[in-house]
Amino acid sequence: MNAHQLLTPEALPLALAAAAGANLLLIALIVCNKIARDRREIRAGTVRTSVINDVVSLLEGDREDVVLPPPRHHDAVVALDAVLSVLEAIKGDSEAVLVTLLEQSGYIGTLAQRARSRDPVRRCASAMLLGAARSAQGAAVLFELLENDPAPEVRTIAAEALGSIGDPRSVPLIMKALAHAAPFQQLRLAGVLVAMGAAAAPFLEHALREPGEMPITLVLEALSEIGLLEDAQPVLTLLRHASPEVRGRAATLLGAAGVVDSVPDLAFASRDAFWFVRLRIAKALGALGVPDREPAYAAYFAVLQHLLLDDNWHVRRNAAAALAPAGAQGEAILRSDGSAFARAALQQLR
Amino acid sequence: MPEVVIRDSEDSAPARPFVIVADDDPVVRRLLEVTVRNAGCDVATAKNGDEALELMAGKQPVLAILDVSMPFRSGLEVARELRARGQSVPIIFLTSHTQEQDVLEGFLSGAVDYVFKPFSPRELQARIKAMLLRS
């Protein structure tokens, strides 16, 4: 039947009726789909509220145990999300209770199986959930993924998951993964090390003494964020590194870690040709504060007074900011300088 | 640790201390409510800073536990508003931020303690009881 036959006066009512019927069917499908979706959302909300109430009662001691839906049940995703939302907010004994609940209900085992899927997206999702669950059983799977998974994104997520669990054994593996990661993944992994704080600091310091493939600037930045440094000597040596980026970050680390005895070295390094290195030195001196012993004390005021005359205004501003809280001597230097930054720094003191 | 009670008079039943809790996350709010009740206190909850201030205008609490980051009015702004009104309610701030500057700002705004998320309910309970005993 062609178009001309359809448009005859006899065939037209039939064609219109067919079109109306198709429209009604489509509308019915849309309405049924919406009703089904709304029911699923209501059910998910009910399950979520019920699980959260049960879990909180368990933590309160009002219940002996909680029965979660089986891991492959259609309510399992919502139930797991509910437990993880409570776990996200707590730590200590209560955390251990919930982790045990997830392990005994089979959720960790199921996630561990899914972490071995052929699909990297599923492996990523499982790794994220295992990290959120903070289970030691799950950590074993995450170690495997971090060491052996062929997909860099899966390894990055496994590292982040281990970082959130806080297992210090993961630090060497994270640093190894970092060495072979793309730049944006390196930043994420460096963030994981920073979040691990004191656990990661010794490994990062070791990387300063025996540089491997991990970029030295990332090591310095991570240690600066953590703010811990046991042995300052390698960092003092880096103040003379060929790269100005490294020299600047070394200065930042010395300031962040409170290495007051580095002031004479910072004073010497302040003759650097690059303004952003001198800026980091001025900021580091501000972070260190006035030393309470010589020769650092004399060097401190001498170098800041010199940096007040720097040809770069960022450096001058930060030198003034470092002198402002430095007591009577700092104030005297600012008054004798008389520049706009010095006056602004004195104004802030009042 | 002894349970904290406040007696209005020798003949009346001991009044439980009244605590206000404010957090925009419903799960955290529920956990805080349970924790405060387990510490032997009556509790009212608020979803944001404005609701918290409304509750405090009605009945003076012995303690307020405030999330630092909340919609409409943050915990820090609530603390400043209370100081401006002359209400000296001890405040425990709850936050996931560990930046030193945020902590300093909190103490300057009148906090007596800081609890970082994720928090231990048992530890928070002990802090509440200790604070109520001191006051």
Image (cartoon, rainbow, N blue to C red):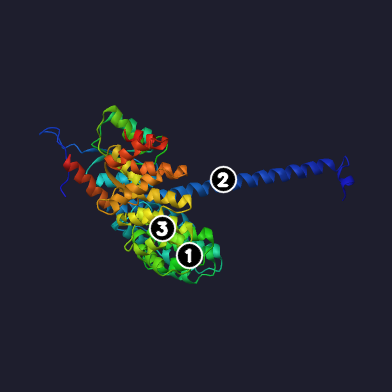
Chain bearing mark 1: A
Chain bearing mark 2: A
Q: Sequence order check: which comes first, mark 3 or mark 1? A: 1
| Label 2 element class | helix
Q: Distance between the residues labelled 2 and 1?
A: 48 Å
Query: What's the amino acid at mark 3?
Result: Ala
Q: Is B54 left, or right, of B122 in this rendering?
A: right
Q: Circle 2 is placed at which residue position?
A: A35
Residue nearer the viewer, A206 or B18: A206
| Label 1 element class | helix
Q: Circle 3 is placed at which residue position?
A: A250
Please state the horizontal and vertical placement of residue A171, each as a whole percent of the image.
40, 66
Q: Nearer the viewer, mark 2 or mark 3?
A: 3
Residue nearer the viewer, A117 or A139: A139
| Quadrant where the image shows the C terminus of chain A | top left
Query: What's the amino acid at mark 1?
Result: Leu
* Badge 2 density bin: few <14, some 14–19, many ≥20, Cα 10 Å: few
**Image point (44%, 58%), residue name:** A247
Query: What's the amino acid at mark 2?
Result: Ile
In the rendered image, the vertical position of residue A281 relative to residue A175, given as above or below: above
Chain bearing mark 3: A
Q: Give the quarter of the image for residue B57.
A: top left
Q: Sequence order check: which comes first, mark 2 or mark 1? A: 2
Q: Sequence order check: which comes first, mark 2 or mark 3? A: 2
Q: How far apart are marks 2 and 3 (CA)?
A: 61 Å
Q: Nearer the viewer, mark 2 or mark 1?
A: 1
Q: Both on one chain, marks 2 and 1? A: yes
- On residue A178, the disc is 1
Q: Is A165 left, or right, of B125 in this rendering?
A: right
